[in-house]
Amino acid sequence: MLEKRKGIIISFIFIIISFSISAQNPSFTHKYRGKIDGIHRGNKSYKDIENAEFRITKENNEYMLSAAIGPIGKMPGTIIINTAISIKEDNSIVALSDKLGCLRFKLGILSLNLYIQRFYASIDKDKCLDINLSCYSIFDKGSPSTLHFRGKKY
């Protein structure tokens, strides 16, 4: 009987600790919908993309910025952004890696890694996500692609 009570008490303590840990590190996904403009690749400009979506996801105190963009112009696939970020106290956002994501080709078999050349992002007091970035692949390091995104949290 005493052993059974000890088992119940230990199980109860385990449950309380589990809830306490999950309450300290809540996971979430924030979605931002807006417009991508200022799209350039080399000397060529492309039209704006309305209703684009970026996501900031937090799991286990790690933040990720993600999006699927495109195709843009005659691009043979979709830009997949998936990069680790840090959100500072002033709501500025810093990329933690030089890898931005990839260009996933339409066939889905191949992809081409994309790297960050320049990355500026923040969340303002109106809960809008603002991103300015330029990126490149191993084939176009001399002429990076650039874009600007501004979207409201929804």
Image (tube, helix red, strand yellow):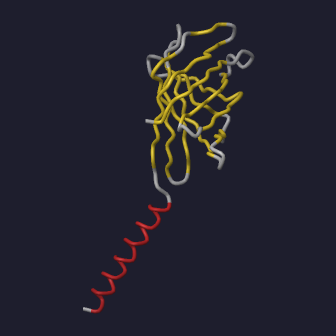
Specify the quadrant of the image occupied by residue 125: top right
Q: Which quadrant of the figure contains the C terminus?
A: top left
The image shows residue 144 at horizontal and vertical percentages of 69, 18
State the residue lying farthest toward the bottom.
Answer: 2
Specify the quadrant of the image occupied by residue 114: top right
Residue 126 lies, with reference to residue 1, above or below; the image says above
The residue depicted at 52 percent of the width and 22 percent of the height is 35
The front one of 125 and 27 is: 125
How many numbered marks are there?
0
Residue 32 lies, with reference to residue 49, above or below; the image says below
The front one of 135 and 129 is: 129
The residue depicted at 61 percent of the width and 42 percent of the height is 85
The image shows residue 75 at horizontal and vertical percentages of 53, 12
The image shows residue 50 at horizontal and vertical percentages of 47, 18
Residue 75 lies, with reference to residue 20, above or below; the image says above
Q: Which quadrant of the figure contains the N terminus?
A: bottom left
The front one of 91 and 93 is: 91
Specify whether 86 is left or right of 56: right
The image shows residue 105 at horizontal and vertical percentages of 49, 18
State the residue lying farthest toward the front.
Answer: 126
The residue depicted at 61 percent of the width and 31 percent of the height is 100
The residue depicted at 55 percent of the width and 21 percent of the height is 36
State the residue lying farthest toward the right.
Answer: 142
Residue 92 lies, with reference to residue 36, above or below; the image says below
